[in-house]
Structures are given as C-alpha cells and as structure tokens.
Amino acid sequence: MTGEFPQQAGFPDGARPAEGRRHVIRRRALTLLIIVLLIGIPAGYLVISANQSRASGKDKEAKYSATGLTEGWPSKLQRRLYQVPVPHPAWWVAYYETNNWKTSRLYVEFETTDAGLSAFLTSMGVQPDDLKPGDIPIGERDRDVTGWTFDGPGTWSGLVHEQKDPAPTHEVVVNHDKPGYPRVYVVSRTVP
C-alpha cells in the first residue's frame, strides 16, 4: 500500500455514498437540539435563579425598611430573646423589631382575654395588680416608631418591668376599653 486508504467494508472501491438531503437535515437538527439543551437549559436556570434572588432581596428590603408594625406573630426566637410570651389565645397580633449598636427593641401588640393578660404578665414575672391605672410608660420615641397613640377612649394602665442586664426591660400599656378583651402594647428593650 503506497499512500492509499484501505477499502471501507461494505463500500466498493472505498467510496462512501453521498448523504441524502433528508439525512443531513436530520443530523443538523439533532446537533442543534443537543447544543440548545446543553447551553439553553443552564442559561435559563441562571436567569430564573437571578430573578428569584432579586425578588427575594426586594422583599427583604421592603420588610426591613418598613416602619411600623407587621401583622403576625414574632418568631419563637424573638419572643424568647425579648421575653415577650404572647399568650394563647391572642389575636390582632403585630410586631416590629429594631436593632442598632446600642439597643435592640421588640414592639408587640395583641388583643387577648383577661385570663390571657394575666398569664402574659405572670410569664413575664409581674402580676396584674402591678398595672398602674392611668400610667402610660411607653415614650414618644417608641410611639413614633410604631404609630401607637394612647389618647383614645378606654381605661389605660401600664407598668415598667426592669430586669438586670442582659435581661430585657419591658414597658407595658393595656387598654381595657373592651371589657374582658384587653389590648396589650409591649416594648421590650435589651442591650446587645
């Protein structure tokens, strides 16, 4: 053999038959499909993932840049850390947390029953008798943060529960306007 290619099996004289037009189109379509699958699917996944991440960031930004209360219960961790044992039953629950280098605060409001109020105060380490009629210890700064106003109708009472650091200090205001269903406002403040 002098520079010649060996004959291919099944083809006389080593010649391959020309591919049919239909076969060429099918082969190219299959190649294109494979390329799209190998490149398109991961690229599509990246676009979807980026959009979800961006949306998640916007949701978090809105949540944490909001001022005022958010409807719902504070997390179990927040309730434990700030020692705010929201009682069962409780409804119309809302909360807001602020943190800075000096002080962290959890603002919570809810409505409960007289028994729920008693259980709440007892769990905090105070008694219902510790509530002072007409006393509203939550200051203007905290009222501005939450939008709370304590000038409406009702019989108001309040207390301050100071504890040794690092335990939080609680300021509690109760509106007894609806007999049997007090509305409770709490500011729990701790030093990080």
Image: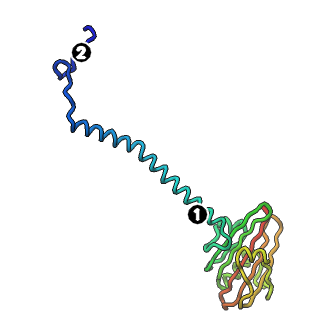
Which is more toward the observer, 173 or 125?
173
Which residue is found at the position 21% from the left and 31% from the top?
19
Horizontal relation, residue 47 to residue 79: left or right? left
Labelled disc at residue 141: none
Which residue is found at the position 80% from the left and 77% from the top?
160
Hey, what amino acid is under mark 1? Answer: Asp
Vertical comparison of 21 with 14: above or below? below
Which residue is found at the position 59% from the left and 61% from the top?
58
> Percent from the top left, x then y, of residue 11?
18, 22
Kindly identify which residue carries mark 1.
59
Q: Secondary structure at mark 1?
A: helix
In the picture, residue 32 is in which quadrant? top left
Quarter that holds the C terminus: bottom right
Which is more toward the observer, 189 or 11?
11
> Percent from the top left, x then y, of residue 1?
25, 8
Kindly identify which residue carries mark 2.
6
Vertical comparison of 177 with 92: above or below? below
Given the current orientation, which residue lies at the most extreme front position? 21
Q: Residues within 10 Å of mark 2 (few under 14, many from 20)?
A: few
Hey, what amino acid is under mark 2? Answer: Pro
User: What whole-number distance in Å separates the C-alpha atoms at marks 2 and 1?
Assistant: 70 Å
> Percent from the top left, x then y, of residue 184?
70, 81
Q: Secondary structure at mark 2?
A: loop
Which is more toward the observer, 60 or 129?
60
In the picture, residue 124 is in which quadrant? bottom right
Given the current orientation, which residue lies at the most extreme top position? 2
